[in-house]
Amino acid sequence: MKIWRRTTISSEAAEHWRTRGLKVFPFKTPGSDVISRYQFEIEESDPLWPALKAFLNGDHTIIRTMFTDKERLNAEWCIIWDNHSIVSYRVPQDNAWSEEYFTESCEKCGVGWKQIAPFRLKAEPKLGKNQFCGFGGGFELFCTPVVLEEFARHGINGFEIWPLLLKKKGDEQAASLKQIIVEEMAEPAIAEELVERERYSQTDCPFCGQTWHAHYVRGMLPLRKAALKPDLDFQLTNEWFGNSSSARHEILVSQRVVRLILENKWKGAELIPIQAV
């Protein structure tokens, strides 16, 4: 596991830190060719990071954690996201939260939504070498028949299969993709005493009372084993993660699913190991 930090600094600061060994790159202001700042990315284990952190003095940095396949295989559960987007095929293009597909969301914060109908695509999507994909929202997970056949052969459970429909009307189904729908849900599982507090937080909606949690970006999210259903290969977190209407229950997959994905070298899915305690 490696934890990386990324942000920009002024030209003057960049020159100083370059002399100390930091790799910096020109950062153009969006919509302009003017270079007023420089971008860097550094691993937290880098000897230079403590001094650089002190220099930043709390300024925001983007944090990402990179995991190894060994860590994924050793984890009892992983969060699964798509990392290949087919959002350009989505119908309608201009309304990601169309009432055709979703209901029950809080009118103030957007949390609490439920998908009620299969998504529509304007055409059969081009997948390249990917076996998984989505719209980039993190909660929708599509896969090819090859994946579903292998899941069936190994008795993978905990999900339903919904079609993806083609065009604006009718019931013609996409041949290359199906949606994995997960409805089984764990009990509340976050081990609050073990979470890191630099970025992790939670917000309560004053209107509906629902809570959503910040995405866990630094290290492994600690979840209690006793709250998870051990006889399932797919289940949802009880908690909502994200920000208001973009929040969702994360999809958890078992070590059996992780092993199939890695052994078959299926592309299009990101696996994020959790810490089961």
Image (cartoon, rainbow, N blue to C red):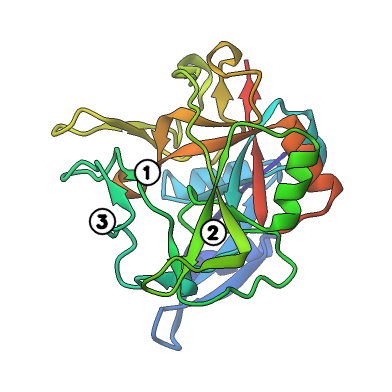
Please identify the quarter of the rendering in which residue 257 is found.
top right
Task: Single out the residue that lies furthest toward the right.
Answer: 263
Please identify the quarter of the rendering in which residue 171 is found.
bottom left
Give the camera-side residue of 107 and 161.
161
Whether 240 is drawn above or below 191: the answer is: below
Which residue is found at the position 34% from the left and 34% from the top? 212
| Sequence-first tag of 3 and 2 | 3
| Circle 3: residue type | Glu
| Sequence-first tag of 2 and 1 | 2
Task: Single out the residue that lies furthest toward the left.
Answer: 207
- Residue 158: x and y in percent read 60, 31
Q: Using the numbered discs, state the Cα–Cα distance from disc 3 to disc 2 in whole angstroms.
A: 19 Å
Residue, disc 3:
99
| Circle 1: residue type | Ala
Task: Single out the residue that lies furthest toward the top.
Answer: 226
Count residues near mark 2 (Cα–Cα under 10 Å), then give few for <14, some for 14-19, many for 20+: many
57 displayed left or right of 127? left
Observer able to see residue 68 = no
Observer able to see residue 215 = yes
Residue, disc 1:
247
Whether 175 is drawn above or below 201: the answer is: below
| Sequence-first tag of 3 and 1 | 3
Give the SS element for disc 1: loop
Instruction: Please identify the quadrant where the C terminus is shown.
Output: top right
Instruction: Please identify the quadrant where the N terminus is shown.
Output: top right
275 displayed left or right of 137? right
Give the camera-side residue of 48 and 224.
224
263 displayed left or right of 155? right
Residue, disc 2:
134
